[in-house]
């Protein structure tokens, strides 16, 4: 999947930030724009990829963003 179709998260000295522009400097990780992917990432894979331990504030902010994402894949029907 192309990077532009994914959501980038960046480790900065202040916090983990959601980088919708793809231009924030720092160690980054990518997640699909689906809630299930974020749920799995927040279980540990995201912290591992960013080489940090998520703070309660980071986790709260990321979970709030996750709630805005679609729960299931919304695939476009293929015409026959």
Image (cartoon, rainbow, N blue to C red):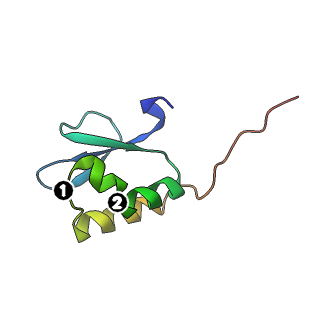
Q: Is residue 41 left or right of residue 73?
A: left
First in sequence: mark 2 vs mark 1:
1
Residue lying at the far right in this picture: please name it. 80
x then y, percent, for residue 21: 33, 36
Residue at 31% from the left image edge and 65% from the top image edge: 59
Residue at 26% from the left image edge and 33% from the top image edge: 23
Residue at 38% from the left image edge and 61% from the top image edge: 42
Looking at the image, residue 32 lies above or below residue 65: above
Residue at 40% from the left image edge and 59% from the top image edge: 65
Q: Assess disc 2: are there few (<14), some (14-19) or many (≥20) residues with their C-alpha within 10 Å of its C-alpha.
A: few
Looking at the image, residue 13 lies above or below residue 2: below
Label 1: element kind: loop
Report the front residue among 59 and 44. Answer: 44
Label 2: element kind: helix
Disc 2 to disc 1, how far (Cα)? 16 Å
Question: What's the mark number on residue 67?
Answer: none
x then y, percent, for residue 35: 51, 57
Report the front residue among 41 and 7. Answer: 41
Mark 1 highlights which residue? 15
Q: Is residue 68 left or right of residue 71?
A: left
Give the position of the C terminus as an image quadrant: top right
Q: Quadrant of residue 61?
A: bottom left
Mark 2 highlights which residue? 44
Eye-nearest disc, 2 or 1? 2
Q: Is residue 66 left or right of residue 8?
A: right
Looking at the image, residue 46 lies above or below residue 78: below
Residue lying at the far left in this picture: please name it. 13
x then y, percent, for residue 9: 31, 46
Do the residues bearing badges 2 and 1 touch, measured as CB atoms within 8 Å? no
Q: Assess disc 1: are there few (<14), some (14-19) or many (≥20) residues with their C-alpha within 10 Å of its C-alpha.
A: few
Q: Quadrant of residue 10?
A: top left
x then y, percent, for residue 62: 35, 60
């Amino acid at each position: 999947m192309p990077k532009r179709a994914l959501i980038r998260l960046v480790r900065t000295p202040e916090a983990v930030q959601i980088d919708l522009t793809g231009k924030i400097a720092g160690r980054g990780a990518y997640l699909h724009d689906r809630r299930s992917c974020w749920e799995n990432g927040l279980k540990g894979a995201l912290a591992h990829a960013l080489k940090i331990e998520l703070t309660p504030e980071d986790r709260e902010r990321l979970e709030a963003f996750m709630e805005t994402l679609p729960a299931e894949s919304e695939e476009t029907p293929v015409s026959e």
